[in-house]
Amino acid sequence: MPVRPAEKEAELEAHLRGICFKTGPPSRLGVEIEWLVHDARNPRCPIEPDRLHSAATTLRALPLTSVLTFEPGGQLELSSLPARSLTECIETVTADLALVRPAMLAMGLGMAGHGHNPWHRPQRVLADPRYDAMEAYFDHWGSAGRSMMCATASVQVCVDAGYEEPGPLGHGRRWLLAHLLGAVLAAAFANSPTSEGCPTGYRTTRQVVWSQLDPGRTLAPPPGPDPRTAWVDYVLDAPVMCIRAEDGPWHAPEGLTFREWIRTGVPRPPTQEDLDYHVTTLFPPVRPRGHLELRMIDAQSGDAGWIVPLAVTAALFDDPEAAERAYRIVKPLAETAGSRPAPRNPLWRRAARGALTDPELHAAAVACFAAAQEALPRLGASPEVLAAVADFTERYVARGRCPADDHLDALYAAEGDLIVGKDSQ
């Protein structure tokens, strides 16, 4: 007997509830790191698709522990496996990078850590039914969709959902912490102030791009006492971006939500696999996938730039004392955020534009980084990691700066030199 739509809806709701927050003692940590791939001699030169496909073939032959993929614009991503400690996570990814970077350079390719491509406009280099459907879908919202797909890069930190019970490491507390602390992390690690060589007026242009996309799949779910219910409703009421097919395009009927797809069965009845895939097309700042994916941090410059946001985030989420301090520090930011969801609320907009020049975000960042520095030895962080976090704190956080400010300083200095040169002629 065919399953009735109401029964199917209840079945899929139960499935979502069972997988979105897998609670228990926080014991695993992961990181996903993206880089913009460019010509090693001329970063302003876009990479031809054939050259990128050749690089992908070479890199996938390397004995990597992390999962290596390429994004639509050719961004390279390394996704670690769940690690049992901060040290294990860092050591594993560092070892993989020690293989990837030389192989890329041997092919004349470089890897740059910027949250948004500073050189040229978005250009898709990967042809895939998913990306074809995604591009067509986001084109309804303007140019931001192509920019997100092809010109952005991030450091995504993955932490466990936490305990079922309330407390510093309870999943409800961690869910709220992620959405308030997320603005502080976005501001502290803002690293995308330019596009096509020009300042955008924001320190994290990447975050602005995300805020301009389909609100049904890129804004945070509404706050409430039950994160599971909020997430289940969010997923089922989100528009379907694509419907997978063996032949032909993956386009979905315009405006069709997953809940409506269940109830109508058109163009075909959805399956649990369709629901799981649908979740991968949702991009809120914090995405529950059993664990929590924190998706708001810009890609960082330097071979080890990704280590600092990973270490700081791990400390503030997984050390009970630091988690409690961080929650008390950022809780007052809820008043600034107001009722609008991230990243479109005033708190996140201030983080995107002013970063740590904003007094409230600066004060929160100083206090949170102090809590993280005290917690990291308790998590077994190495002297090198402690030194990296201390250096970042002194160079940026204590001074109300972020990596984007370095790029802006260099850009304005170069413009000044050009003006001086013209005046002297």
Image (cartoon, helix red, strand yellow):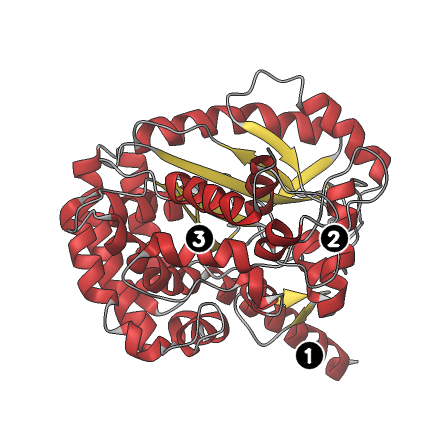
Label drawn at residue 327: none
Q: Secondary structure at mark 1?
A: helix
First in sequence, mark 3 or 2: give its number: 3
Q: Nearer the viewer, residue 165 or 55?
A: 165
Looking at the image, residue 159 sits to the left or right of residue 197; the answer is left
Q: Which three-letter amino acid code belongs to the residue tagged 3? A: Val
Q: How many marks?
A: 3
Q: Is residue 305 visible?
A: no
First in sequence, mark 3 or 1: give its number: 3
Which residue in the protein does label 2 denote? 252
- The residues tagged by marks 1 and 2 sit, at their Cα atoms, a distance apart of 56 Å
Q: Secondary structure at mark 3?
A: helix
Task: Please give the name of the residue rendered at 65% of the width and 57% of the height, measured from the top-left corner.
Answer: 148
| x and y percentages locating residue 379 in the rendered image | 21, 36
| x and y percentages locating residue 334 in the rendered image | 30, 73
Badge 3 crowding class, 10 Å Cα cut-off, few under 14, some 14 to 19, many 20 or more, is: some
Q: Nearer the viewer, residue 395 or 305?
A: 305
Task: Please give the name of the residue rendered at 23% of the width and 50% of the height, measured from the top-left corner.
Answer: 372
Quarter location, residue 144: bottom right
| x and y percentages locating residue 287 in the rendered image | 45, 50
Image position of 68 with respect to 221: above or below:
above
Quarter location, residue 175: bottom left
Badge 1 crowding class, 10 Å Cα cut-off, few under 14, some 14 to 19, many 20 or more, is: few
- Pointers 1 and 2 in contact (C-beta within 8 Å): no
Looking at the image, residue 295 sits to the left or right of residue 99; the answer is left
Which residue in the protein does label 3 denote? 232
Badge 2 crowding class, 10 Å Cα cut-off, few under 14, some 14 to 19, many 20 or more, is: some
Task: Please give the name of the residue rendered at 49% of the width and 47% of the height, measured from the top-left corner.
Answer: 155
Q: Secondary structure at mark 2?
A: loop
Q: Which three-letter amino acid code belongs to the residue tagged 2? A: Ala
Q: Nearer the viewer, residue 423 or 163?
A: 163
- Give the quadrant of the C terminus: bottom right
